[in-house]
Amino acid sequence: MNPSRRNFIQKSMLTVSGLSLAQRSLLANIFVDDLPYKMTTLRSNVGYFTERGGTIGWMISNNGIVVVDTQFPDQSKHLIEAIKKQSDREIDLLINTHHHGDHSGGNIAFKGMTKVLLAHENSKKNQMRVAQANGKEDTQLYPDTTFTSEWSQQIDEEMITLRYFGPAHTDGDSITHFENANVVHMGDLIFNRRFPYIDKSAGASIENWIQVLERTQKIFDTDTIFIFGHAGDGFDVIGNLGDIKAKQNYLSKLLDTVSTEIQAGRSEEEIMKIQSIKGADEWKGNGIERNLSAAYQELTSD
Ligand SMILES: [Zn+2]
Ligand SMILES: [Zn+2]
């Protein structure tokens, strides 16, 4: 809970005894609406959850429940509470788009509650490697099912398909398609108008990331609703093909910019001083130097 909310509740408690019944029921409604998270339906029974960490995707129907990513344990507990209000079912399928803690850290909250926990095989390896390195093996629930290039299963009336197009944000990023609803969870393949994290320690590749987004644009269509892992200030975690193209453009302009500087004989130190990427200046936020450094590393490693 954030301090201002705690303050608000404490103040409300102090005055509650002096209120009429009608005022008290109004207060109760305010409490219900003041949830720390937001559940939004996109199309049919598919939607998304936001609180803290990478955006979670979900499908909740009478005969099947699917969850894509888990943020952190407290956030997953909130999501589970919200699901339980609609259904007593066990979770049929839990997916991790990739291993990062803001997408898989909440897995533990689903322990004993999910039939299948699925991720790309590299994503599972990364989860295990990072948990071991941080001494967090007790608190990380690993995927029990993995795939290499494509995986599909029908759950209730929805066909769920996962695809892997090679290294990008990490070396284990899945693209999850709810085919009938035509909703796609992109994980951290899209930081919408915000400098992305490019995790070279987990096999990221900017060059292949551009290809991954090329294939994404070929497979999906103008009707597809995309869910993004993160977005910059004032931008949405939901978008369309145009946002995929814009992100692809950012990555190619990033490589072009750094490549031009290298060819002009600039040092790594000088390149790190670049403040924005020409031709993709909508991208903002913290971390441009980490993007420049990843591009420099990639362009000089061969
Ligand atoms: Zn993330
Ligand atoms: Zn990530």
Image (cartoon, grey):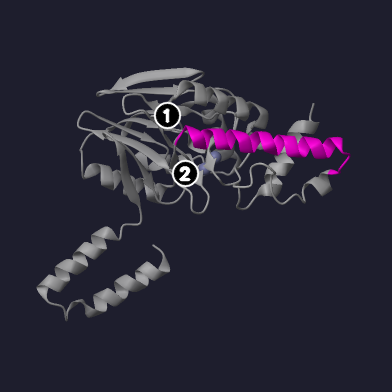
Asked if the stretch drawn in magenta spans residue 252, the answer is yes
Q: Is residue 195 visible?
A: yes
Amino acid bearing label 1: Thr
Magenta region, main secondary structure: helix
Asked if the stretch drawn in magenta spans residue 132, the answer is no
Image side of residue 273 versus residue 6, left or right? right
Q: Earlier in the sequence, mark 2 or mark 1?
A: 2
C-alpha gap between disc 2 and disc 1:
24 Å
Amino acid bearing label 2: Gly
**Could you say which is closer to the camera, residue 204 or residue 109?**
204
Residue corresponding to mark 2: 54
**Could you say which is closer to the camera, residue 107 or residue 51?**
51
Identify the residue shown where x is 38% and y is 49%.
75
As drawn, the residue found furthest toward the right would be 265
- Asked if the residues shown at circle 2 and circle 1 are in contact, with their CB atoms under 8 angstroms apart, the answer is no
Residue corresponding to mark 1: 222
Range of the magenta residues? Answer: 240-267
**Could you say which is closer to the camera, residue 68 or residue 121?**
68
Residue 30: image quadrant is bottom left
Residue 70: image quadrant is top left
Identify the residue shown where x is 32% and y is 47%.
39
> Residue 299's mark?
none
Label 2, residues with CA under 10 Å away: few <14, some 14-19, many ≥20: many
Image side of residue 132 versus residue 27, left or right? right
